[in-house]
Amino acid sequence: MLLLALGGALASRTEIFPFAGPPDPWGANTPGLRGTWVQASSVTTPEDIDEVLRRAEAGHFNAIFVSVFPSGQTMFDSALASKYEKIEPEFDPLAYLVPEAHRRHLDVHAWFATGRVKYKGAAPILARHPDWALVGPDGEAAGWLNFTRPDVRQFISDLMLETVERYGVDGLHFDYTRYPGPQWGFDSYSIEAFTQEYQLDLNQLRYADLPAYGRFEGNPLIVRGSAQVLAAFANGLPAVAFNTYGEGEVVLLNWDANLRTVAVGAEIMQRSLWRWRPEGGPVYLLRSQTNVAEYGSDNVEKARAWLQHLGWAPLEVGEEDVPGLTTELALVLPNVYLIPSETAAHLAEFVRRGGGIIFIDGPSRSIHLPAIQAITGMQSRGRHFQEATLMSATGEHPLIPDSQRSWSPEIYQGWDAKWKQFRQRGINLLIQGIYERVKATHPDVEISVTITSDQEEAARLYLQDWPAWLEGGYVDFIVPRGYVEEVRELGAVLTAWKPVMEAHGKITLGLRAYNGEGESEAPKAPVQLLTEMGLVSEAGSNGVMIFDLDHMSDQQLFALAAGPFSSPTMPADR
């Protein structure tokens, strides 16, 4: 019957299990959750939902985690937010999905991307409430909700409760309940609240001048030739370098300043541009197809947004345009790591004639070219670095704003710890508040959060105080995403989480059903997926989550139903 339902995709069990049987410590009665995520794009019509439920049944899942709030829009009729634009006005996906899923013994967890609310450049929620947005140290506004604000937490809580009370969902699942990076949070509300609580002006932690403390990463050039190092990191790496070549000048921001983790990067960028274009106006921005082909175009778009934020008008040029560039305008190279030798020669000629160039996280993979060495004044590259450290001026220079503060590194680290704790508390209050509110009237509704499987990264970069959620008892379970390409890579994830599983028993590991990204994406062989499932079971995971049903092959579904999920589909029992 199942083979026919899958369209005859499989000839026999041995095509999936080339050995005696699948790794199956659960036996035929997998305990706990047999869950899978379902993307919003798969539940826009009744026909799409029917297919989702058919496939979930075929794989013997007992719960589906359905995206109901992707990028600030709802997949249901809400009184609080606008509905996803691709849904017909008269159709309510959640109203159709929940009863149909329950009829098939499938629990439905409403999956909310609570932070990121921007979709195709628009954020309707932030258009109505611009003060709800996260703000970076240089004033950049993100398409992301600020969990520090009580009114934001109330909005998310009301939205989630709406799905419980109107649709009878079985769980609420938090995703993107984090900060996009540790540099965010300099809105007026947070500044006032932090300053009052700690008696420390949060504006100082923007670091608009040096010394500046923050999380820096990049692909640095490290051996100085003719360049003058204007600022350095505490780890000894050059941070800002300045070089003259012929009639022109070159500034190297020797880290990924596009991330805008401290405000001083914007100040140095402005001073560099003003040095060559004191009247303002347009500036060249190089879109290197050589780099786009390997690294994508995100860094070009980040640089464009940054320059526009600073008041400049970027004129995009390609590598083929460099020979004809006029030296009246400065040229910005955003994260251009690879430079063809011919283009390098043209860049050198541009500087020799009097042009100015700003490298953002410079040409590390092309520093061996004599022309690149000549214009940057640097000789070789170092290894990629990423760490919280201090950037300090090495002396006086017009490009470098220097406060000449002499505070100890411990002072900076102490302030940074308080600033992180302040923002972590907002996330904790959000999750705790919803847990208590929902459990008061709907005690059977489960509250879960998915996070990266890197425990340190979750806390340090994304400001998720996940141990507090477990110790405070305001989550039913956490789903660390143990996404790996090869089975052997799963070992480190399980080693890290096994003690937590033993201590709390509220951990359900998430696995990914495919390898690769984009055009190279392909479903994992069923035997690999089941092997990973066996390993997470042995480590003590309370069931399993698989990302995602949309990417799963029919062969994988059959393997689950024939192996670890072979018992009848029943609602999750935790």
Image (cartoon, rainbow, N blue to C red):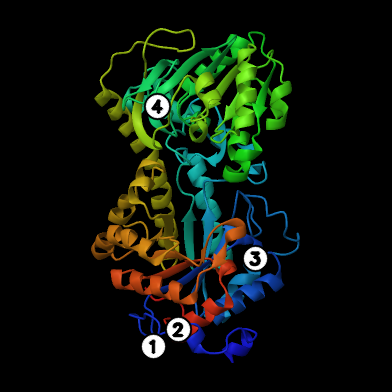
Q: Earlier in the sequence, mark 4 or mark 2?
A: 2
Q: Tell me which amino acid carries mark 1.
A: Ala
Q: Which mark is residue 222?
A: 4
Quadrant of the image for the C terminus?
A: bottom left
Instruction: Name the amino acid type tagged 2.
Output: Phe
Q: Which mark is residue 42?
A: 3
Q: Single out the mark in the foreground, 4 or 3.
A: 4
Q: Are marks 4 and 3 in contact (CB under 8 Å)?
A: no
Residue at (58, 78) in percent of width and height: 554
Q: SS class of the residue under badge 1? A: loop
x%, y% of residue 205?
Answer: 39, 24
Residue displayed at 48% across by 61% down? 172
Residue 183 lies, in percent from the top left, at: 44, 33
CA–CA distance in space, label 4 to label 1 = 55 Å
Instruction: Give the alpha-carbon distance from disc 4 to disc 2, as whole Å.
Output: 52 Å
**Mark earlier in primary sequence (1, 3):** 1
**Distance of mark 1 from mark 3, alpha carbons?**
36 Å
Which residue appears at 24% of the width and 65% of the height? 502
Q: CA distance from mark 3 to mark 2?
A: 30 Å
- Relative depth, front residue between 187 and 22: 22
Name the residue carrying label 1.
Answer: 20
Q: Earlier in the sequence, mark 4 or mark 1?
A: 1
Q: Which residue is under mark 2? A: 17
For residue 412, side relative to residue 246 (left or right) = left
Instruction: Provide residue 505's location: percent of width, then percent of height.
Output: 29, 66
Confirm or deny contact between disc 1 and disc 2 (CB under 8 A). Answer: yes
In front: mark 4 or mark 2? 4
**Crowding near pointer 1: few (<14 within 10 Å), some, many (20+)?**
few
Mark closer to the chain start, 3 or 2: 2
Q: Nearer the viewer, mark 4 or mark 1?
A: 4
